[in-house]
Amino acid sequence: MSRGGDLDRRAVVAELLRERGDLLVVTGLGSPSYDVMAAGDHDGNYYLWAAMGSAAMVGLGLAKARPERPVMVVTGDGEQLMGLGALATIALRRPPNLSIVILDNGHFGETGMQPSHAGQGVELHRVAEAIGFPAVDLVTERQGVEPLRRRVHARAGLNLAVVKIRPENPPRVLPPRDGVHVKNRFRLALGHRPA
């Protein structure tokens, strides 16, 4: 049983990043990082390597530290399932500038496309609703992406969207893998000196 969707992951991510302005982006492990990189590398992208389950919490910290900037976390269903407790913390903290976008193909794409919990019936948008996210979307069709993009860029309050994508692995577009470089580049983009 697969409960992914029909949307093209790369097209969705490219649309979300269109005219990004001062948007800061945190990517989850694997395919979300490749998708963001495929849309164009940017100093405001913070790619996580070997930190599965951490993207949403990094996004929370960044949103709290930089409330004047919109922050978007792009992650997958497999990774977010490892961080369900993080969603509860985020719902309680309610940063008004944070958007979490879960690309849900119903599979663990990085380990062989085994069905994920989401692929077997766990509905992450309903989990987010149950723990108190003020705005939750389930995006299953292309016309739902543009309203989500506007909300992300407008800092229109804490929101979470589950985007149902095709269960496929497009060619990898690897972002920089040097963690020190990514960190320092991101710090510079925020106006801080490298650490």
Image (cartoon, helix red, strand yellow):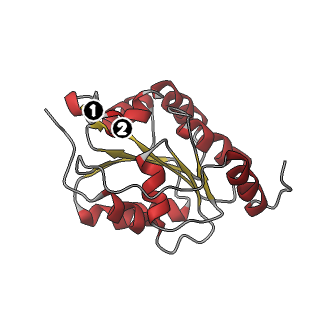
**Number of callouts:** 2
Residue 103, position in %: x, y? Answer: 35, 47
Residue 140, position in %: x, y? Answer: 23, 53
Q: Which of disc 2 and disc 1 is earlier in sequence?
A: 2
Q: Residue placed at 73% from the left, 63% from the top?
A: 189
**Can residue 76 be seen in the rendering of this structure?**
yes
Q: Residue placed at 50% from the left, 33% from the top?
A: 52
Residue hosting label 2? 77
Q: Residue placed at 43% from the left, 64% from the top?
A: 16
**Can residue 135 be seen in the rendering of this structure?**
no
Task: Name the quarter where the N terminus is drawn.
Answer: top left
**Front-lying residue, 162 or 10:** 10
**Front-lying residue, 93 or 140:** 140
Residue 91, position in %: x, y? Answer: 52, 35
Farthest residue in the top direction?
A: 85
**Front-lying residue, 157 or 160:** 160
Spatial CA span between label 1 and label 2? 7 Å
- What kind of element bears circle 2? helix
| Circle 1/circle 2 CB separation < 8 Å | yes
Q: Amino acid at mark 1?
A: Ala
As drawn, is 10 to the left or to the right of 71? left
Mark 1, Cα crowd under 10 Å, few <14 / some 14-19 / many 20+, is: many
Q: Is residue 67 above or below residue 58?
A: below
Residue 174, position in %: x, y? Answer: 49, 55
Q: Which mark is residue 132?
A: none
Q: Amino acid at mark 2?
A: Asp
Q: Residue placed at 19% from the left, 54% from the top?
A: 6
Residue hosting label 1? 118
- What kind of element bears circle 1? helix
